[in-house]
Image (tube, grey):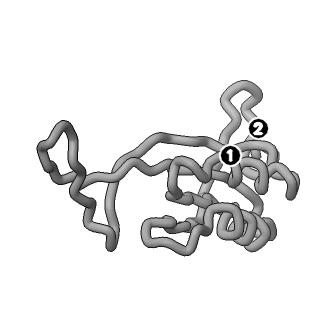
Amino acid sequence: MKMISAIIKPFKLDDVRSAISEIGVDGLTVSEIRGFGRQKGHTELYRGAEYQVDFLPKVKVEIACQSDQVERIVDAIVSAAHTGKIGDGKIFVTQLEHTVRIRTGETDLEAL
């Protein structure tokens, strides 16, 4: 089992959700987050005053899946979230050791 965590631009969330649904993935978790990478933030002008925005708004999408689904899911996220501009985001794939469905007590693959 794997956990896919994708950090994307907020306006790309609907595109990513649609792409994930089209390949048959029926569960994901979304969190609104803030951060920066190579962008290092930017300067904005508000009411004549200039200020530095160090942490940019992003969305984190997390998907727990079977190991054989990883490449299809990653490809779907990349194609849906890509704009070609700096700040498109990153995808992290990590190993899931154990999963439990709280309601039924099912574990591991049955819990996904």
Mark count: 2
Q: Position of residue 93 (x, y in %)?
A: 58, 68
Numbered label attached to residue 106: 2
16 left or right of 12? right
Q: Position of residue 5 (x, y in %)?
A: 55, 58
> Residue at 74% across / 73% down in the picture?
71
- Label 1: which secondary element: helix
Q: Which residue is mark 1?
A: 14
> Residue at 34% across / 68% down in the picture?
37
99 left or right of 20? left
Q: Nearer the viewer, mark 1 or mark 2?
A: 1
Quadrant for residue 66, please give it.
bottom right
8 left or right of 34? right
Q: Position of residue 10 (x, y in %)?
A: 52, 48
Numbered label attached to residue 31: none
Residue type pointed to by label 1: Asp
Q: Position of residue 27 (x, y in %)?
A: 74, 43
